[in-house]
Amino acid sequence: MTIDIQTFLDPATLAERSEEERRRAARPSPDEATFIDISDYLDEDFYRRELAVFRRTWHLACTSAELAEVGQFVRWDFMGRPVIVTRSGPGTLSGFYGVCAHRGGPVGDLELGSGSARRFVCPYHSWSYDLRGRLAGRPSPEHFPDSADSNIRLTPVQVAEHAGLVWINESPDAPDLESWLGSVGYAIQNGDIGAYSLESHRRYQVDANWKISTEGGIDTYHIDHLHSRTARGILDNAGTLVQRDGPHSTAIVPITRPELVGAYLPGGLGDRLPANVQCWVFPTHLISLFPYAIALIAHYPVAIDRTVVDWRILISREISSAELRAEIVRNYEATFDEDRALTPLIQRNLESGVLKRACLSVKEDRVLHIHQAMIEEFS
Ligand code: FES
Ligand SMILES: [Fe+2]
């Protein structure tokens, strides 16, 4: 199918299209019902193949605003490997592993998730590296047989920027970011990320397979139920429009009470799309765009049954009240906490072997899509 995200994001046709979508969501026939195998969450070989896919796909590092000035960096543990991304020059980004080229010491301050630096130093023997990851100095260089210091550098990681977001890819053979994103890149750009500023960034572990964790972020079916005391009543699950694009997808979820959402913004919603645009970037990134806030969420596997959840909340720069900004973050946190509490219980139940397959409604197509896209990437 040809993808026309531009039309898809047209406010004038949103209501009409959602109505059509609601009609199409009538009960599917039994042979249309879709199932996923529970072994996708438990099988060690499946998991090993997933990790290989993670190692060659693009992953969000941070927002461009976090690396606005030369010297600014972010450093984090990316699935067991320390990664540093820097603004190494005006308009230039560099990425490398924080694994010292001498004997593997930790490069950069382990405690610092972000900051500003001119050099990154390994504490073991004080080798230092510049913002591009090249060796800048080492004590007693004359004692080393290899005097060509200029050839020594930290192992690089690919970095690219798109529409206010910085991405990394561990594979040197990866397709460029823009072609990887396809039309979902247009939807992200349409979100105007530069008009929002970072309000909160959290990382925590959950004892569950990464797919259980990530599926909670893209399933609008559960919103009115698990989140009946938090996020309920804002989104129109039945009217959701989903457009797949290769392994990615864009979902437009109409906002049922625009007056509530508009109340966050000094000028109301204005002519903005009364919808939550959810950009799904395979395999794990949800970029959830509301007119007043943006959530950037990823779920990284660290073991078959353990996942790091990483989320950032960005809030519209139009909202200046610190109190209101804090309230928005609290609302997100309350919703995420409900998912966080439930996820390990699902893991335990799937491990019990009672359920062999899961049955999905047509409105859970994106859950199915993750499994299908992953299996396709294996080949
Ligand atoms: S291991 Fe880093 S300086 Fe020796
Ligand atoms: Fe949820």
Image: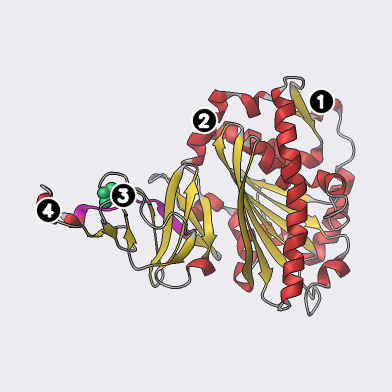
Relative to residue 300, is residue 270 drawn left or right?
A: right
Instruction: Report the number of discs.
Output: 4
Give the Cα distance between marks 1 and 2.
Answer: 30 Å
Q: Residues within 10 Å of mark 4 (few under 14, many from 20)?
A: few
Residue designated by label 4: 147
Identify which amino acid the numbered label 2 is placed on.
Arg
SS class, disc 2: helix
Residue designated by label 3: 100
Q: Which mark is residue 31?
A: 1
Q: Residue 105 at what x, y percent from top left?
A: 33, 47
Give the Cα distance between marks 2 and 4.
Answer: 41 Å
Please provide the residue range marked out in magenta.
151-160
Q: Residues within 10 Å of mark 1 (few under 14, many from 20)?
A: few
Give the Cα distance between marks 3 and 2.
Answer: 28 Å
Residues 181 and 70: in front is: 70
Q: Is residue 152 magenta?
A: yes
SS class, disc 1: helix
Q: Earlier in the sequence, mark 2 or mark 4?
A: 2
Q: Residue 195 at what x, y percent from top left?
A: 63, 73
The nearer-to-camera label among 3 and 2 is 3
Identify which amino acid the numbered label 4 is placed on.
Ser
Q: Earlier in the sequence, mark 3 or mark 1?
A: 1
Whether the residues at callouts 3 and 2 have beta carbons within 8 Å, the answer is: no
SS class, disc 4: loop
Residue occupying image coordinates x 77% and y 54%: 334
Identify which amino acid the numbered label 1 is placed on.
Asp
Residue designated by label 2: 49
- Specify the principal SS of the magenta part: loop
